[in-house]
Amino acid sequence: MSHKFKVKQTVRLKQPGISDNWINSAGVYEVLRLMPADQTGELSYRIKSGMTERAVRESEIRSA
């Protein structure tokens, strides 16, 4: 299984939470690192916007 997104690609959260909208009004993140699959087998990523960095599953993001 290969990652859908690449390092340095810009992505958005599919359903940003309230705190995500407050911290990152543009909603655009940059992919920092490709991570292995979690316990469910879904691939994950490390993403960042400004000072906010987080880990997300592939199903939680989309192309910007």
Image: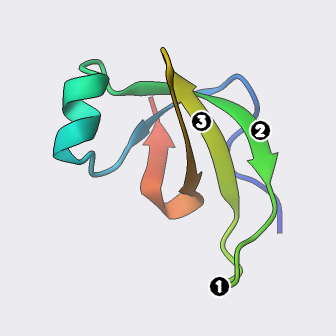
For mark 2, what is the residue? 33
Q: CA distance from mark 3 to mark 2?
A: 7 Å
Q: Nearer the viewer, residue 49 or 63?
A: 49
Which mark is on residue 4?
none
Callout 1: helix, strand or loop?
A: loop
Which mark is on residue 47?
3
Q: Residue at x 76, y 70 (%)?
A: 37
For mark 1, what is the residue? 40
Q: Are marks 2 and 1 in contact (CB under 8 Å)?
A: no
Where 16 falls versus 3 (above or below)? Answer: above
Q: CA distance from mark 1 to mark 3?
A: 20 Å
Where 8 falls versus 19 (above or below)? Answer: above
First-in-chain label (2 vs 1): 2
Which amino acid, mark 1? Answer: Thr
Q: For residue 48, which quarter of the picture? A: top right
Which amino acid, mark 2? Answer: Arg
Which amino acid, mark 3? Answer: Ile
Which corner quadrant holds the N terminus? bottom right
Where 19 falls versus 4 (above or below)? Answer: above
**Image side of residue 24 versus residue 35, left or right:** left
Q: Residue at x 66, y 73 (%)?
A: 42
Q: Are marks 3 and 2 in contact (CB under 8 Å)?
A: no
Q: CA distance from mark 2 to mark 1?
A: 19 Å
Query: How many other residues sit within 10 Å of disc 1, few (<14), some (14-19) or many (≥20)?
Result: few
Instruction: Give the x, y percent position of residue 5.
Output: 68, 42
